Image (tube, rainbow, N blue to C red):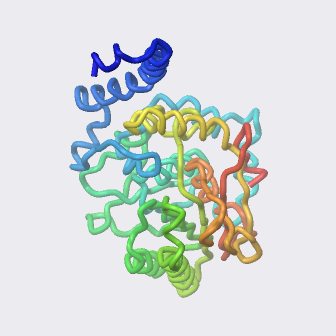
Amino acid sequence: LRRAAQQMPPFQQRTMRRLRSAIAPLWLPTLAGLALGLGRQAWTSAAFSRSSLAAKPASRHDIGSFVGARRPWNLERIASASGDASDGRAAATVARRATLEAGDTILVAGAVSPTGMIVTSMLKGMGYDVRPVLTKTMDPYAIWGMPIRGFVPGGSEPTPAAAGLVVADEKFLQTDLVVAFVKQIGKIGNLKRVTFLSAERARSPLENMFGNTEEEERRSREDATLSACKEVGAECTVVRTGVLRGGGSKSDCPHNLGQEVYMRIIDSVSSIEEELFDLNQRGAEVTDAATSTITEGGKFGGPFGKKSETARTTAAAALAEAFSSESAADKVVDVVSVEGTESLCSAKW
């Protein structure tokens, strides 16, 4: 290869040298990230190892469970955003809360998914008694870096009399499990509102050409959850999103998951793309699915629909803010990210 390169015309040799120079900066971060991941196990925390969850490199759309990924470095920003009376956010949130009030208990299923971790932190900052559903080997403080009480189903503690329930698992919990959990909490008689994350899976443009069975399954899960909530007398808000992206430190959300969101993506180009997404796609388009054109062959569902993506911080905000919105009761809403310089505040939600 070296001899062949030497025999090239001079202009081709110059082109090859320039190409190598352009590619080198892209490979170096990738190799360095691989060395960091394998050498010092950057993704393994106390909670991660105790829960026996394996950390692994991820693609842009599959960054797995973030157990242990959150660190206390964002606590000052979180306290400032949720407790500083000067911006009026905390006071306005509490004043508007008609369905649930500060201090009400909210259970979070799927709390160790990336979106679940963000919404748990948000609800804590809004003054709710948030109880993430965990296994007995998981340490809430090691996961969120703040005092949060987890709830272990089947443990010594009975099921809390929760006023709210969030189902935020990005991989989708089994429908039967979600329905059974809603009915179990509903029997206690205090359940008022359920918010349910219904995210689109990343797929190729050709997958829908011969029928989108996955979209049908998605709607079936939504209908089953709505029916279960109606049966127990609880209101439900289904938050339908595009492919979930980002959620890291480049977003303006104080509840973000930090730089690890990008570090965990082993491909350096995809990692940079995620950072740019968090920087540029901070706006949100929220529409009622019953009247929206998004689901009619548009952003969701249609084989030739436009690609739809939603920031994890935006999806989490929709799940959290629905508890304080009367108009969100028993609604299916489409939430997609759009270009913007700042996220929606509570009043705009």
Residue in view at x 45 percent, y 60 percent: 170
| Residue depicted at x 51% and y 46% | 121
Image quarter of the C terminus: bottom right
- Out of 278 and 345, give the one closest to the viewer: 278
Nearer to us in this view, 204 or 242: 204
Q: Is residue 16 visible?
A: yes
User: Residue at 73% across / 46% down in the picture?
Assistant: 345
* Image: 63 above or below 9: below
Asked whether, in this view, residue 159 is left or right of residue 207, the answer is left
The picture places residue 107, in percent across and down from the top left corner, at 47, 62
Query: Whole-percent x and y of residue 337?
Result: 66, 51
Residue, x 60% and y 40% (percent of image)? Answer: 277
Residue situated furthest bottom in the rendering: 231
Q: Is residue 93 left or right of residue 126?
A: right
Left or right of residue 84, residue 205 in this image: left
**Residue situated in front as seen by the camera: 57 or 116:** 57
Looking at the image, is 283 positioned above or below residue 70? below
In this view of the protein, can residue 189 be seen by the observer? Answer: no
Q: Quadrant of residue 300?
A: bottom right
Q: Locate residue 340, reporting x and y percent.
A: 74, 41
Q: Residue 233, relative to residue 101: is it above or below?
A: below
Closer-to-camera residue (318/219):
219
Where residue 264 appears, as percent x and y from the top left, is 38, 38
Residue 63 left/right relative to 229:
left
Which quadrant: the N terminus?
Answer: top left
Q: Is residue 169 above or below residue 120?
A: below
Tell how many labels.
Answer: 0
